[in-house]
Amino acid sequence: MSEGGGRPQRSSLLRFAEDVTGTLATRVLTMGFGLFTGVITARALGPENRGVFALAALFPASLVTLSKLGQSQATIYFIRKEKADVSQVVSNVVYIALTVGVLLVLSALLLRETILATVLRGVPLWCLTVVLPLVPILLLESYLYGLLQATDRFRVYNTRLLLEAMGTLSFMAVALLWLKLGLAGALGVAVGVRTVMTGWVLWTVHRGTPLRLRFDTELFGRMIRYGLKSHVQIIASHFHFKAGVYLVAYFMTPVQVAFFAIAERLAEHIMYVPQALGVALFPRLTGSKVERVHELTAQACRQNLVITGAIAFSLAVLGRWLIPAWYGVDYAPAAGPLPYVAWGIVMMSLYVLLSRNFTSRNKQQVNIFAGYVALGGNIVLNLLLIPRYGIIGAATATAISYTVSAAILLLFFLRESGLRWHEPLILRPSDVAMWVRAFREFIGELRVGKTPSGPLGPANDR
């Protein structure tokens, strides 16, 4: 078979490899920019203001998580599985994002005193006010990313991530190192860059998929019914990640929040591997037969564990030297919880990929069960361990609960797939051979003069 101009059609393996490696390469680059940004904010703000910044920047994301309604996953499912009209799907989710976002901002302002006395203890009112406009922006961003994944526009997806990381680093350097704007400047950059980049994505999406003024209520109802199951699952996943930060803030000081947040942020870079795999994998799982879904999931899980395990081990060993060298000696205590959090993130990476399997088959109830059992355990452990052991206790709670969530989901996966325990856990020679074959195909394209899509992923349309 051939594409336009008589060129041979690209294999599904090569397309998948490009989607994964393009997304992963972009995330590695953004990680590098993010590390420099983190160093700048840590050194310019100091531990106390860095802790306030971490809490204030996290709150809009948590608020959005409570109100996503699973529409990002529903967008992928209805475009790929139900073959819904793409323009109408994206028009619907834009309306939902803006309406729900504005309502959330008003609600947060009305409840500001309660919020600042509990989950944002130590955060000034002005900081909350500055970051609240991020709520509708983050909702819209989440929905648009679902569209980009569903329509294989990975170039736009990856370009946006890279430009945001570069812009944030550049403007943080100007605001904090040159203009000396402090905490206000840091929050202003965080809000401003995210707003501009989401606007760019919306404009890009509109060019390829024109928005409509009409709101399709029948489509909305069907997407909500599907999305709510994913929504409940995502709430558990997010607060499983962030419960430790909020509870450290409740029991301890912003300085301790800064230490724990830095350790958590460093470890969360490990998640770039399963996120890159999941972004490319989920649309393919949604359109595949059940046997193939299980096969692809097991393959992704075992490859992921090798890479994330190696990164986690490196962080655990080198963290005690890297953190003082990068962030300054004032942040040396952040190295204490890092090994525990890193192990937990490896387990969570397994959970993330397994959850894609159940979501693609409209069986989110399994993810919900595993997520909420582990979340409950996480909160209980944090309540018991933080007052006694501080941020080490929070990190221990993270490691235990993440491991439990992954184990529960793995048991369900093995039972439904009929696979043996080692198939999703132990790397096979065929996995290495698969990537070697993809590399050879890529080299073969270069030799015949076909232009590859480049480091940012494949072209928008295939």
Image (spheres, helix red, strand yellow):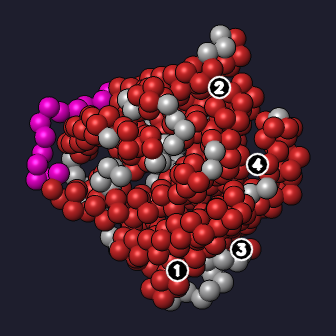
Q: Secondary structure at mark 4?
A: helix
Which residue is identified by label 3? Answer: 427
Q: Amino acid at mark 2?
A: Leu
Which residue is identified by label 4? Answer: 334
Q: CA distance from mark 2 to mark 4?
A: 22 Å
User: Where's residue 118, x and y in %?
Assistant: 46, 48
Which residue is identified by label 1? Answer: 408
Q: CA distance from mark 3 to mark 2?
A: 37 Å
Reading the chain from its start, which is encountered first: label 1 or label 4?
A: 4
> Do the residues under discs 1 and 4 have CB atoms within 8 angstroms?
no
Q: Which residue of the protein is positioned furthest toward the right in this rendering?
A: 321
The answer to whether residue 334 of the structure is visible from this angle is yes
The image quadrant that residue 221 belongs to is: bottom left
The answer to whether residue 3 of the structure is visible from this angle is no
Q: CA distance from mark 2 to mark 1?
A: 39 Å
Reading the chain from its start, which is encountered first: label 3 or label 2?
A: 2
Q: CA distance from mark 4 to mark 3?
A: 32 Å
Which corner quadrant holds the C terminus?
top left
Which residue is identified by label 2? Answer: 169
Q: CA distance from mark 3 to mark 1?
A: 21 Å
Q: Secondary structure at mark 1?
A: helix
Q: Amino acid at mark 1?
A: Ile
Per the rendering, the mark at residue 165 is: none
Q: Which residue of the protein is positioned furthest toward the top in this rendering?
A: 179
Q: Nearer the viewer, residue 452 or 239?
A: 239
